[in-house]
Amino acid sequence: YVIATKYVIWEFYLRKCGRIKRLKLDDFPKQDDKWALVTGGSRGIGLEIVHNLLQCGYNVIIGSSSPEEKRNILQTTLQRKFMKCEVEVWHLDLASLKSVKQFAEKYLLTKTSLHLLINNAGIMFVKEETTEDGYEKHFAVNYLSHSLLTMLLLPLLSKSGTHEKHSRIVNCTSCIHYVGNNDLLNFKEWKYYSKHKAYIQSKLAQVLFTYSLHQKLQTNKINVDVNCVHPGVVNTDLMTSALILPFIGALFLKTAKDGADTATYVALSPDMEGNGGNYLEDKTILQSSKQSYNVKLQQSLWSKTIEELQQWMDDEKFNELIKK
């Protein structure tokens, strides 16, 4: 809680002093006829990101674990509000690699382009639980499933990008990754379980994966940029459920709308064109943790991730794209 408290105080101070400028969507070019996919886009930060993308002309697919009735209501509401855009809300259970595979296959069968992937969904400080695939739940939902989704959709992202206009991937991580350690490579067995450590490690893994993928994209000259962002300590269901005093959220934490700003900036800003392999907070590129720049750890995590996900991947397409 120490690092979270530090960030709450610092971000509150910056907002009160007017040192964080609000995002202005009018500053960004229109994205008509482009397609974006946002996981966890049915509420909180994800929904605010979706609103921003639709306002800028993107067609959006939302991945959501909400019940079908709620998904249908959200889709109808958004479609009525943004009549010039297409928006669909599809079922996605990130605790199941089978669900991720089916979700990606549905996209590849029904859509011909993908210009933006925002891996936003996540869980935090949940009780100890193993997924149907045998993984610790934080690691499965926050890291492994998003890694699989990215790899399955990477060929289409590559095809949709051009030399002048790259496709983009935004991974939503957390400042909490700063206290992560290199104990990352045993995905299924935890000697001592801690919900805090599980969450922290999953967020560090996202940063490491971002840097590894960026290196692969550059080496293979693929027109896709990947970055990771910390949205801030935000007053959402995810955060308030973890607070000792939930009423603190309304007083000191960022709103979900504010929390969506950095991911939206990375997704839309011309300043981020051709600019990948970065960690951002408050729309600013910063140094991530020392551990996240450990190249040996990056490579080991990448290899272990590929090994674990291989049965769900299209090896031929992926290996053709990522040759080195």
Image (cartoon, rainbow, N blue to C red):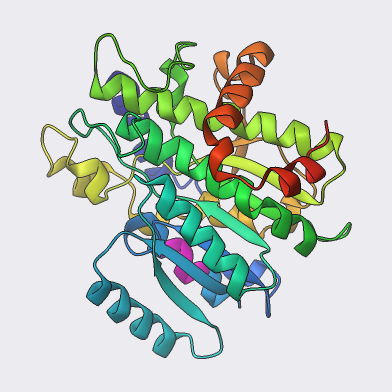
Locate residue 159: give its quadrant. bottom right
Look at the image and say whether residue 49 sits in the magenta stretch.
yes
In this image, 296 relative to 42: left or right? right
Range of magenta residues: 48-52
In this image, 191 relative to 184: left or right? left
Nearer to the camera, 203 or 91: 91
Considering the whole magenta stretch, tell me its main secondary structure: helix
Q: Residue 96: x and y, percent? A: 37, 46
Q: Residue 208: x and y, percent? A: 58, 26
Q: In the image, is residue 54 above or below residue 189?
A: below
Q: Which residue is at 41% across, 58% downward?
A: 46
Q: Which residue is at 53% across, 76% downward?
A: 55
The N terminus sits in image quarter: top left
Q: Tell me, yes or no, if residue 132 can be seen here.
A: yes
Locate residue 111: give its quadrant. bottom right
Q: In the image, is residue 68 above or below residue 261?
A: below
Nearer to the camera, 91 or 296: 91
Q: Residue 134: x and y, percent? A: 33, 31
Q: Residue 20: x and y, percent? A: 50, 47
In this image, 130 relative to 62: left or right? left
Q: Tell me, yes or no, if residue 58 can be seen here.
A: no
Q: Which residue is at 25% across, 73% downward?
A: 70
